[in-house]
Amino acid sequence: MKILVVGASGDIGSHLIPELSNKGYGVRALVKTPKEADKIRMPGVEIYFADITNPRTTDGAALGIGAVYHLDDSYCVVNPEEDLRKLIYEGLVNVADECINKGVKRFIFTSSPFVLGLCNGPLKPVSPEMATEQPNTFYALYKKLCEQHLTVLNKHGKLDVTILRLGTVYGPAVELIKTLRALIKHGVYRIPNNGENKMQAVHIEDVVQALILVLKNKKAIGQIYNVADDRPILYKEFIFKLADLLNMPRPKFISIWVCRAIASLSTIFAKLTNSTPLINNDILTLSTSSFELDTLKTKVELGFSPKYPTINEGLPTCNGFYRKPQQSATA
């Protein structure tokens, strides 16, 4: 079976593709630019260039495909309301339409716990319609709309959908860790607000584990699963642990209002220079909001068991040099 990976060059896609190849699956990697292609180019992986916001370029992407992983994600944009609508929601609609037109049924989508709004306790994997709170960022809003769109397609038999809501993804080569590690090493990182917001992390290897588990599990069709480790933590605990592993002083705190000013200036500068902002106010709101996940359903129905049950086991993998996963000799 050949699998289409959308968002192939991202943190998750670049780890998932070698694992799929190792298991004997054919892979078609959808990327936008040659630079993205270079990140995941390897024997046996077909590169397909397309812009998911332009349906004319995606025509043919799903031809001969047995299943699709839609992993495409975006955060750092100048105008979250407009840019994320195109990149997250309209992109998803275009890819889903391509799959339907080419007769592809199996569709796996990575989403966010923030589609259910702010956390008042462990979030269960319920539909967005059952949420008591509304999303507080454009990122979460468009992920919610994606979930709703896919749920309707699944209900009407157009696609066999599984949705995975991921905790905060980390790992040696994950962009979040690379950025934090550089900023902490240079002594310039500051924790927004007081760092008391609760979060639940998940190691990239455990994300890949969950993605593989749902692929051929018929019981997962039409279902939503939370994917995270076993222990919610405070954001400052995550940062302090990383700093300790780097043998660097623990970062100090910074007012949320100063952070918002920096985010606004970063966005203005990016707009003027046609570049990508390091941070915007949407990202800042996400990073200072609380959530925790109930993963019981994921463990019972999928057999999911985190290789890294807490950051105490997982974060040490992020200190030092990272070796890119290799294909097996039989792939």
Image: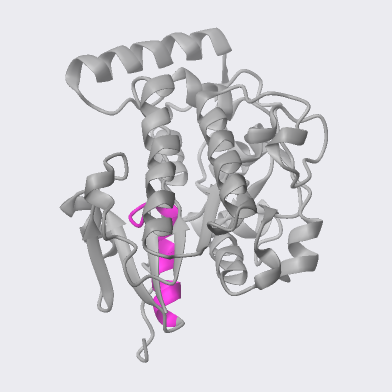
Between residue 147 and residue 187, name the one nearer to us: 147
Whether residue 92 is situated above or below residue 207 in the rendered picture: above
Q: Disc count in the image?
A: 0
Asked which quadrant contains residue 25, the reply is bottom left
Identified at 26% across, 54% down, the residue is 59
User: Position of 273 compared to 69: left or right?
Assistant: left
Q: Would residue 321 be visible to someone looking at this image?
A: no
User: Position of 227 compared to 169: left or right?
Assistant: right
Quadrant (top left, top right, bottom left, bottom right) of the C terminus: bottom left
Protein image colouring? one colour
Whole-percent x, y for residue 324 in the image: 36, 67
Q: Magenta span: helix, strand or loop, mainly?
A: helix
Whole-percent x, y for residue 258 in the image: 49, 9
Whole-percent x, y for residue 282 in the image: 49, 22
Identified at 45% across, 54% down, the residue is 70
Q: Residue furthest bottom?
A: 330
The answer to if 13 sits in the magenta stretch is: yes
Between residue 136 and residue 182, name the one nearer to us: 136
Whether residue 243 is situated above or below residue 103 in the rendered picture: above
Between residue 92 and residue 26, name the one nearer to us: 92
Asked which quadrant contains residue 126, the reply is top right
Q: Would residue 243 be visible to someone looking at this image?
A: yes
The answer to if 236 sits in the magenta stretch is: no
Quadrant (top left, top right, bottom left, bottom right) of the N terminus: bottom left
Whole-percent x, y for residue 316 in the image: 56, 57
Q: Residue furthest front?
A: 156
Identified at 56% across, 31% down, the residue is 140
Stretch in magenta: 8-22
Asked which quadrant contains residue 77, the reply is top left
Between residue 142 and residue 202, name the one nearer to us: 142
